[in-house]
């Protein structure tokens, strides 16, 4: 029986994703464990493995397709000994109720008993191509197994025996079907997509079509440097068209899955969680001195502590000391955590990700340094597993290395606490003996969900954090 390969949920919160790249094609044999595709989630691009063995009978979702819902059938797999043609046209049993009538009908048992143009004996790709080309499948002779109508038959019928249907771009309403990368390359090179033949699935224009494009002699390619037309492009979304001032030179890029998720979660946080902000100044001199001594002692282990590693530890210890801030607001209940797992904001090319240092209060500073070095490197390569960036009990965001003195951070839901850390700088300071001197000082600001954390408890957490930073031996005792 044919096996439906569905869009997987590669993380607990994944609802949809982008099928970035197929690593197999129709007719390829796969075994359990083989990498079939690369799928872009809201945080990373992950590999999708086969769990069964067989032959790829059909691919239903083209690479580059965005917003593919979890559970959508993306391909059909023919099991060992099964007819590939029948597997390709089979509808999965659980989807039969919602499938179109022609795909829900069982395929004839005889390979030669169906009419040549029977809709149920056409591959899914052939059906889609015929529909877009306005062709009647009943008039097309099938050259596939058992008279099955395949892609080549539709291409032949669409051109009267000449060139393929791909000789002209496929148009969906007023929009030419092309991959995001093909659109980007065409825009950079000044190529009119209406003059490009699509060779991808269902006539989609892909990167190779742009790379091999030759401009028609009678219609030279317009150089990209030419002034842009005043009217917005036909494929601009209605929301973008409302905001766009086409008189100003501009480019438009689609939001990545990560950027969409960041926008949605931050808007959710600001709308649902009433933020309260508490700031204080923290003297860093003793912490910097202890860090220098510890780095000297750790040279043989090739471990180097950063200030941020020590701040992560200080926040972890403070959260255990003030558990009222180590919580999640859950409507009619409150979740209290007995361990501090700190989500650390890391900037990456496509946005922001928060790898988690588990048990930050209990592990050593050298262990935190090693963990952050590994997590930070893999975060920038998009290789973190979901459990390494989803969860956590509180967050820390450090923009001091960028010279930012003071800022407030948006709470990372469903957490209730995030600490924003500014740059350490030399400032005038009143010393313990009331003399005026110079100290290295940073400003730290805690953002708290006021539904879960009272202002007094937030103030206690900030004071505990300052105590650990200004008396750093308390973190390693």
Image: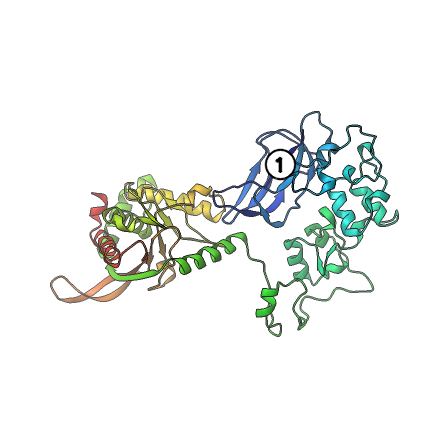
Neighbourhood count class around disc 1 (C-alpha, 10 Å): few under 14, some 14–19, many 20 upward = few
Give whichever of 78, 334 is nearer the camera. 334
Residue 288 falls left or right of residue 260: left
Q: Residue at x 64, y 58 (%)?
A: 184
- Residue that sits furthest to the bottom in the current view: 247
Q: Is the residue 150 above or below the residue 434 in the image? A: above
Percent position of residue 96, x then y: 66, 38
Residue 11 in the image, given as x and y percentages of width and height: 49, 42
Depicted 371 relative to depicted 190: above or below: above
Label 1 residue SS: helix
Q: Nearer the viewer, residue 139 or 434?
A: 139
Res. 67 visible in picture: yes
Q: Is residue 5 left or right of residue 345?
A: right
Residue furthest left in the image? 433
Q: Does residue 130 appear to the left or right of 287 in the view shown?
A: right
Looking at this rendering, what residue extends furthest in the top direction? 81
In depth, the one of 186 and 450 nearer the eye is 450
Q: Which residue is pictured at 76% across the width and 53% down the height?
A: 197
Residue drawn 82% across the image and 44% down it: 137
Q: Quadrant of residue 38?
A: top right
Residue 253 percent coordinates (x, y): 59, 60
Residue 292 visible at all:
no
Above or below, 456 against 158 in this view is below
The residue at 61%/65% (across/down) is: 238
Quadrant (top left, top right, bottom left, bottom right) of the C terminus: top left
Find disc 1 in the rendering and name its residue.
94
Occupied quadrant, residue 387: top left
Q: Quadrant of the N terminus?
A: top right
Q: Nearer the viewer, residue 215 or 43?
A: 43
């Amino acid at each position: 029986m044919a096996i439906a390969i569905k869009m997987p949920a590669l993380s607990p919160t994944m609802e949809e994703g982008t099928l970035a790249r197929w690593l197999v094609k129709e007719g390829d044999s796969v075994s359990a464990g083989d990498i079939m595709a690369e799928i872009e989630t809201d945080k990373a691009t992950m590999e999708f493995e086969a769990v069964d063995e067989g032959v790829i009978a059909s691919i239903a979702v083209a690479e580059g397709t965005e917003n593919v819902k979890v559970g959508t059938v993306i391909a059909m797999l023919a099991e060992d000994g099964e007819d590939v043609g029948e597997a390709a046209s089979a509808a999965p049993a659980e989807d039969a109720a919602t499938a179109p009538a022609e795909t829900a009908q069982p395929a004839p048992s005889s390979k030669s008993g169906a009419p040549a143009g029977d809709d149920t004996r056409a591959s899914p790709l052939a059906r889609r191509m015929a529909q877009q080309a306005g062709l009647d499948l009943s008039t097309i002779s099938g050259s596939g197994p058992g008279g099955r109508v395949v892609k080549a038959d539709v291409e032949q019928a669409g051109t009267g025996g000449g060139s393929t249907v791909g000789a002209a771009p496929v148009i969906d309403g007023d929009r030419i079907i092309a991959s995001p990368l093909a659109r980007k390359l065409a825009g950079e090179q000044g190529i009119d997509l209406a003059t490009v033949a699509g060779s991808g699935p269902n006539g989609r224009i892909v990167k190779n079509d742009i790379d091999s494009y030759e401009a028609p002699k009678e219609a030279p390619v317009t150089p990209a440097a030419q002034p842009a037309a005043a009217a917005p492009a036909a494929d601009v979304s209605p929301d973008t068209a409302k905001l766009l001032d086409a008189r100003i030179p501009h480019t438009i890029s689609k939001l990545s899955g990560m950027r969409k998720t960041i926008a949605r979660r931050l808007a959710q946080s600001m709308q649902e969680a009433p933020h309260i902000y508490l700031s204080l100044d923290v003297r860093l001199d003793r912490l910097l001195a202890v860090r220098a001594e510890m780095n000297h002692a750790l040279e043989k282990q090739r471990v180097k502590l950063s200030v941020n590693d020590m701040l992560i530890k200080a926040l972890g210890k403070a959260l255990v000391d003030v558990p009222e801030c180590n919580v999640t607001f859950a409507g009619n209940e409150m979740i209290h955590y007995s361990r501090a797992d700190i989500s650390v904001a890391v900037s990456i090319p496509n946005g922001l990700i928060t790898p988690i240092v588990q048990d930050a209060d209990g592990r050593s500073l050298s262990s935190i340094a090693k963990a952050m070095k590994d997590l930070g490197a893999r975060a920038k390569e998009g290789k973190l597993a979901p459990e390494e960036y989803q969860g956590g009990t509180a967050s820390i965001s450090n923009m001091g290395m960028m010279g930012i003195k003071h800022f407030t951070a948006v709470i990372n839901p469903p957490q209730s606490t995030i600490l924003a850390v500014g740059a350490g700088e030399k400032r005038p300071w009143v010393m313990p003996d009331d003399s005026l001197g110079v100290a290295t000082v940073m400003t730290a600001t805690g953002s708290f969900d006021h539904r879960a954390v009272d202002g007094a408890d937030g103030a206690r957490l900030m004071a505990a954090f300052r105590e650990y930073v200004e008396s750093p031996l308390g973190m390693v005792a």
